[in-house]
């Protein structure tokens, strides 16, 4: 058998200290810019420290509601004026809340960057939360929750979070529940914005056809004067105690054809040193090729599911490590058993040398593809900044991946995965 | 930098058509093989067969067993997949440039040599049923299916690409293998490749791999034109949930028809811009489109509205999808929608609205062209219903559309007797039929 080809990276072509400009503004904003003059456009993204972890329990969804309302008008512009500017330029801009932060993202043709930044600044710093618009958004959010209640995948995820994160802030959905959305008043939105939106630990990333100096000057001009002394320290979330035993629950949703499974555990934080061994292990378990070992067992061999894969979240706090599959209701238990068996096998002994070589090669080889577009680079830069990975992270990436061993994968995986202490949430027709 | 330049078409002696475009911005190559076969080529009893054949194309050949193939692509860090649509089926790999040969070999091999092992076929039967069941979980799927059945009682656009469950349960290995043998041949295929290569070298390699593959018989394309609709169709689909959905679909011209580009402008004005980006690039919101402004912002009769005008070989549909506001009714939403259409039929739109639509289209191309995968996609996709000129001339043709053209298209196509109005009505919402 011939020796397998090794894919290697040209480190100089990857975004790094040589072409990323990183500037910290006096008011606490960190700006990262990477030029790309092969493109005609720019991608803008970033976050402020205004995520759903700040939601009161009786008003879950407040951060998300606030973020959605930012685009409804400012002291200077109405909703229509904002969108007329954006859509006339062929640009886009949106804000939405996650757990820790409210993220924003947009794009425009390169010449329109100043206008896009102007709109971003205006909606972040001077939103007015018009009362009539709040009711409109409330209806839209409630309709979204009605649709969520009919979505087996989303309901299985919700159930998983409640089991795996019992007692932990991550157990709540950032889009809330109908009763908590109903409880939110216009003052709550104004107060939430006044308390949490500000430049402290805010990050802005710009990638595309723009000179870094110009981008820095623009951001300084637009956002450099923003201050909010009320902004608290970012929230630190606690660890999660593992379950004592496997807990399984089913959410019955009548008249559905298929049941969805979300099964797994609470995984590591992104900054944990064993994160990458766990990530490569996860790929062998349920991603590599046609969804890894789990895809091979549940889809290819047993023919039970169209999709069956595992994923490990990259999160500031302890993120979920899950296996997901969609199956006919009569095959639900069989699929759960097959997945549990694969996890058992995965934890029994180290992965094979060939599996490790495959997945290392995959992780190194796919990097240029993920960095092809402005948005892809912006996303990588945002991750590097969020998790303090350093500007030379991508230059050291191949070495880090190649140094992972079979033993380190097993050790990292055993710390988190336990086939006898899983959260198993399913949603579909009544069983 | 010009994104959309014409490129020559190369035809090998066995009929295989090749489109190549050098792009040297990243060390990547995206390679696509397109077959002129889709759900359009299926008759009752065989619905879903094109999609199932596409699945079987991942099961391997004698030369490249499935696992070996998957591993080769994954080890290189490549991305690969396949899609079955109304008019076509396509397979792509986007790879590091120095690994593209693996993809070219795999595609040349599976053009003719897939095994269709009976056991694997049975296992895939349940996978495909599961794929359909997953879609059925979404109430919108049932509505879309019912609207298509009503729109195309004759033409085979009337069934879902995934096929009817009864056919998925009944079809046998011989049916699938026959379908494969009928449509998978070099003379029924187009290869489109974009990325970091030298054209002469790549073409030489393509000739080595593909030119000796035997020409197949002329593929039997199904041709059952849909006669004009005689009056409006209205239908109600019932199911679980709390949210009322609407699908208002008008019969629309084929992509190659002269009215298609004015129709794209109409679509953009009424329901917002649509692009041709399949792989990233994102979209542009439609908050200031006429229908969103009226139905969602002014009258609170809908929570969202969006439109789609797919580019197809035969006349297909312009579809407007609505989520009805919980405090409103489908009747109110339809009334507002009809008044907006009437407005467009009564007076041509201001030139400013047309100019905005073309600027949005230009921006969407700029975003999409950052992806080499998108660029290779455009080159082959357009060949399936027109030619690549259709894409390179796209912006020019949009710019040539006049306000009177848009008005005429609105008058010609957006008539009640040319449409199907479908409502998804939750059981517990009482009678909301139209």
Image (cartoon, coloured by chain):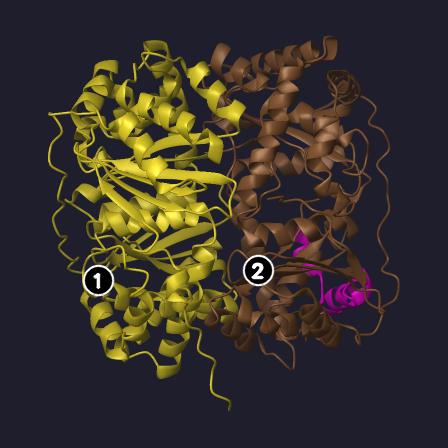
Chain colours: A yellow, B brown
Q: Nearer the viewer, residue B346 or B231?
A: B346
Vertical arrangement, residue B339 with respect to residue A146, above or below: above
Whether discs 1 and 2 lie on one chain: the answer is no
Q: Which residue lies at the image location 14% right of the left edge and 52% below the top edge? A: A240
- On the image, the x and y values in percent for residue A302 come to 50, 69
Res. B46 image quadrant: bottom right
Mark 2 neighbour class, 10 Å CA radius: few under 14, some 14 to 19, many 20 or more: few
- On the image, the x and y values in percent for residue B282 come to 50, 39
Secondary element type, mark 2: strand
**Residue A26 in magenta?**
no
Q: Which mark is residue A421?
A: 1
Q: Nearer the viewer, residue A232 or B253?
A: A232
Res. B129 image quadrant: bottom right
Q: Nearer the viewer, residue B72 or B249?
A: B72
The number of numbered badges drawn on the structure is 2
* Chain to which mark 2 belongs: B
Vertical arrangement, residue A204 with respect to residue B196, above or below: above
Vertical arrangement, residue A410 with respect to residue B434, above or below: below
Res. A170 image quadrant: top left
Q: Nearer the viewer, residue A34 or B319?
A: A34
Identify the main secondary structure in magenta: helix
Specify whether B374 is left or right of A203: right
- On the image, the x and y values in percent for residue B373 come to 57, 54
Q: Which residue lies at the image location 37% right of the left edge and 62% below the top edge? A: A336
* Chain to which mark 1 belongs: A
Q: Which residue lies at the image location 33% right of the left edge and 47% below the top edge? A: A157
Q: Which residue is mark 2?
A: B81
Magenta range: B164-188
Specify whether A23 is left or right of A241: right
């Amino acid at each position: 058998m011939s020796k397998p080809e090794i894919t290697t990276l040209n480190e100089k072509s990857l975004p790094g200290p040589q072409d990323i400009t990183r500037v910290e503004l006096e008011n606490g904003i960190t700006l990262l810019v990477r030029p790309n003059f092969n493109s005609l456009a720019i991608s803008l993204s970033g976050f402020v420290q205004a995520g759903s972890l700040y939601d009161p329990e009786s008003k879950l969804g407040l951060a998300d509601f606030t973020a959605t309302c930012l685009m409804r008008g400012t002291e200077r512009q109405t909703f229509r004026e904002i969108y007329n500017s954006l859509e006339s330029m062929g640009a886009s801009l949106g804000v939405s809340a996650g757990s820790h932060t409210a993220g924003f993202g947009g794009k425009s043709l390169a010449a329109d960057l100043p206008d896009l930044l102007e709109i971003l600044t205006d909606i972040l710093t001077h939103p007015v939360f018009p009362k009539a618009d709040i009711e409109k958004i409330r209806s839209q959010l409630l309709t979204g929750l009605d649709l969520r209640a009919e979505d087996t995948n989303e309901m299985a995820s919700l159930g998983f979070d409640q089991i795996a994160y019992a007692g932990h802030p991550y157990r709540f959905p950032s889009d809330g529940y109908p009763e908590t959305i109903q409880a939110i008043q216009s003052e709550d939105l104004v107060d939430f914005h006044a308390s949490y939106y500000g430049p402290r630990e805010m990050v802005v990333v710009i990638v595309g056809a723009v000179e870094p100096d110009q981008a820095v000057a623009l951001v300084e001009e637009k956002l450099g004067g923003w201050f909010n002394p009320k902004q608290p320290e970012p929230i630190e979330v606690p660890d999660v105690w593992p379950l004592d035993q496997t807990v399984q629950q089913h959410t019955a949703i009548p008249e559905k054809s298929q049941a969805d499974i979300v099964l797994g555990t609470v995984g590591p934080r992104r900054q944990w040193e064993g994160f990458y061994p766990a990530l490569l292990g996860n790929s062998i378990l349920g991603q590599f090729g046609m969804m890894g070992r789990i895809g091979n067992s549940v889809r290819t061999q047993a023919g039970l599911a169209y999709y069956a894969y595992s994923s490990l979240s990259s999160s500031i706090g302890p993120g979920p490590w899950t296996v997901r599959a969609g199956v006919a209701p009569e095959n639900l238990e069989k699929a759960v058993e097959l997945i549990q068996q694969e996890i058992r096998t995965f934890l029994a002994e180290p992965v094979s040398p060939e599996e490790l070589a495959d997945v290392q090669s995959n992780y190194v080889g796919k990097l240029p593809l993920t960095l092809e577009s402005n948005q892809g680079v912006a996303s990588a830069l945002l991750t590097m900044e969020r998790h303090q990975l350093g500007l030379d992270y991508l230059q050291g990436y191949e070495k880090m991946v190649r140094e992972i061993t079979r033993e380190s994968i097993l050790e990292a995986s055993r710390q988190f995965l336990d086939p006898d202490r899983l959260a198993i949430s399913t949603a579909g027709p009544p069983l | 930098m010009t994104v959309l330049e014409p490129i020559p078409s190369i035809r090998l002696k066995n009929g295989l058509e090749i489109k190549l475009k050098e792009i040297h911005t990243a060390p990547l190559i995206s390679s696509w093989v397109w077959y002129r076969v889709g759900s359009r080529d299926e008759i009752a009893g065989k619905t879903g067969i094109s999609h199932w054949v596409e699945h079987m194309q991942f099961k391997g050949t004698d030369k490249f067993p499935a696992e070996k193939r998957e591993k080769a692509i994954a080890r290189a860090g490549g991305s690969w997949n396949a899609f079955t649509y109304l008019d076509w089926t396509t397979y792509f790999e986007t790879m590091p440039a120095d690994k593209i040969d693996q993809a070219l070999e795999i595609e040349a091999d599976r053009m003719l040599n897939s095994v269709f092992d009976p056991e694997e076929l049975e296992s895939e039967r349940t996978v495909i049923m599961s794929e359909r069941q997953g879609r059925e979980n979404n109430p919108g799927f049932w509505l879309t299916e019912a609207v298509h059945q009503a729109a195309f009682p004759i033409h085979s656009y009337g069934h879902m690409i995934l096929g009817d469950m009864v056919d998925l349960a009944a079809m046998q290995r011989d049916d699938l293998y026959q379908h494969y043998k009928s449509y998978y041949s070099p003379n029924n295929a187009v290869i489109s490749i974009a990325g970091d290569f030298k054209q002469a070298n790549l073409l030489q390699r393509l000739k080595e791999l593909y030119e000796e593959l035997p020409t197949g018989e002329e593929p039997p394309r199904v041709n059952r034109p849909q006669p004009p609709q005689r009056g409006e169709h209205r239908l109600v689909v019932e199911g679980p949930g709390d949210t009322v959905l609407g699908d208002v679909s008008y019969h629309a011209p084929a992509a190659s028809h002269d009215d298609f580009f004015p129709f794209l402008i109409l679509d953009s004005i009424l329901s917002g811009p649509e692009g041709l980006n399949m792989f990233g690039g994102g979209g542009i919101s439609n908050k200031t489109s006429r229908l969103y402004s009226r139905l969602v912002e002014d009258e609170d009769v809908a929570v969202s509205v969006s439109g789609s005008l797919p580019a197809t070989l035969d006349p297909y549909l312009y579809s407007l999808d609505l989520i009805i506001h919980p405090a409103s009714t489908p009747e109110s939403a339809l009334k507002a929608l009809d008044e907006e259409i009437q407005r467009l039929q009564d007076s041509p739109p201001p030139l400013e609205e047309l100019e905005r639509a073309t600027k949005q289209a230009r921006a969407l191309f700029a975003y999409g062209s950052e992806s080499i995968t998108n660029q290779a996609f455009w080159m082959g996709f357009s060949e399936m219903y027109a030619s690549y000129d259709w894409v390179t001339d796209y912006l020019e043709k949009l710019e040539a559309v006049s306000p009177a053209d848009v008005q005429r298209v609105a008058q010609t196509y957006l008539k009640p007797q040319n449409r199907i109005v479908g409502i998804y009505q939750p059981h517990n919402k009482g009678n909301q039929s139209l």
